[in-house]
Amino acid sequence: MNRTNSLRLACLAFALILSACANQKKMMEAPDTVPGDKLSEDYLIGNWCTDRELTSKSNRDAGHSGMLNMRPLFWRLKQGGEWQVSSSGWLYENHGRWRLKGLDNLVLERSEGEPVNYQASFKDLALYLKDEEGKFLVLAGCE
């Protein structure tokens, strides 16, 4: 590879990184809530990462197993209801739709499969999702 091609490749990589950073929208910080509080869709828009420690602790506190083998997962909830998932935190792909139902129910509709209802609440900037069996999935804001 000659010097000109190397320079072009470096400029292209820099432009891709810059455009990815510029495309990120800052998440709106949600106040702490309790189940039953009315949530705004604006609180949910942004990038979320599964938080293994908080998920395990919340499930143990609720009398369930700790879910210690949970793999890292990255979610992007976009305005308009698009739900994207990434296993790397870098490349996202469409996974389905999301919407709020009622005061505090987050409905996740996978492209394939049945919708899943979670009761959503916020505590210390983390999103606590409780399923119909009472088990928790906790997401922390990530950038």
Image (spheres, rainbow, N blue to C red):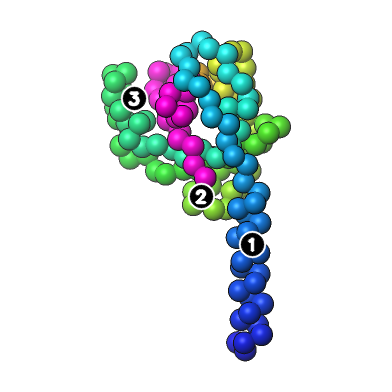
Residue closer to the observer: 128 or 134 = 128
Query: Which residue lies at the image location 61% right of the left edge and 74% below the top edge?
Result: 10
Indicate the position of residue 59 as horizontal and vertical percent values.
Answer: 33, 24
> Residue flagged by tag 1: what amino acid is it?
Leu
What kind of element bears circle 3?
A: helix
The residue identified by callout 3 is: 58
Q: In which image quadrant can residue 2 be found?
A: bottom right
Q: Where's residue 17, x and y in %?
A: 60, 60
Residue 116 in view in this figure: no
Q: Give SS at disc 2.
A: loop
Of tags 1 and 3, which is closer to the observer? 1
Tag 3: amino acid: Ser
Above or below — where is 73 with respect to 16? above
Label 3 neighbour load within 10 Å: few <14, some 14-19, many 20+? many
Q: Earlier in the sequence, mark 2 or mark 3?
A: 3
Q: Which amino acid, mark 2?
A: Gly
| Residue 16 circle label | 1
Q: Position of residue 78 (x, y in %)?
A: 65, 36
